[in-house]
Every structure is written in C-alpha cells, then in structure tokens.
Amino acid sequence: MKNIIKKIFGIHPEQLKITGLTTVGNGDEFNTIQEIRKHNLRLIVLKHYNGYVEPLSKAINKHPTYVSAMLKGLDNNNPRIITSKMARLIENTLQLKSGSLDELMNV
C-alpha cells in the first residue's frame, strides 16, 4: 500500500502533512457541521502534530490517506466526511470533551 501511495502522491504516507488552515464556508461563516469538523481537525493536526497526519492516524487506528481525505475541503475531489461516530472516536482518543469537534475551535 505504501508503494501505491508513493506512486500516486509522490511521497510515503508518513510524509503526509498539512501546512495551514484552508478557508471553508463563506469567509468567517461556517455553513455545515462538516466544515466545522474539518476546520477543527485541521487545527488539531497543526497544533498537536506539527501538521503531520500520521501520528493522528495511528492514534485513531486509521490509514494516513483516510485521515488526509477527512481533512480535504468539501469542494475538493473525493473528500471524506467526518461522521458523528468518527468525530466521537477522535474526541475520545484525544481526550477531548464529547461534541468539541462540532463547535468551532479558536486558532
């Protein structure tokens, strides 16, 4: 699988990294729970994992490309939604308050 990811993305899964928050919604306004969850998850990866996806993926026992797809904006190709079940798993694993991914976190 790592070789396939390297062929597709040109990097190993361990190297998947985000570099900043993307704009979602209309300016400062978030339209859906998905936009809020994606924003919050990106913020968590940036703040707690220095932008690297792999440590979070290991913590929640998901493949780095799965987590990377959850971080994609809804307007990108093949974004993965963050279900309520997944949001609660992430919150529980990271010892966050239940429902905290559903509320806009501060930068």
Image (cartoon, rainbow, N blue to C red):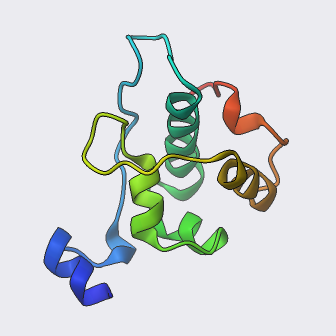
What residue do we see at 62% from left, 75% from top? 61
Q: Quadrant of the C terminus?
A: top right
Foreground of the two, 78 or 65? 78
x, y percentage for residue 104? 64, 24
What residue do we see at 35% from left, 75% from top? 13
x, y percentage for residue 44? 58, 46
x, y percentage for residue 34? 53, 34
Residue 54 to residue 74: above or below: below
Direction from residue 50 to residue 7 in the image, left or right = left
Residue 81 to residue 27: above or below: below
Direction from residue 84 to residue 58 in the image, left or right = left
- The number of numbered badges drawn on the structure is 0
Q: Quadrant of the N terminus?
A: bottom left
Foreground of the two, 96 or 85? 85
Q: Quadrant of residue 22?
A: top left
x, y percentage for residue 5? 25, 78
Foreground of the two, 79 or 101? 79
Foreground of the two, 30 or 50? 30
What residue do we see at 50% from left, 30% from top? 35
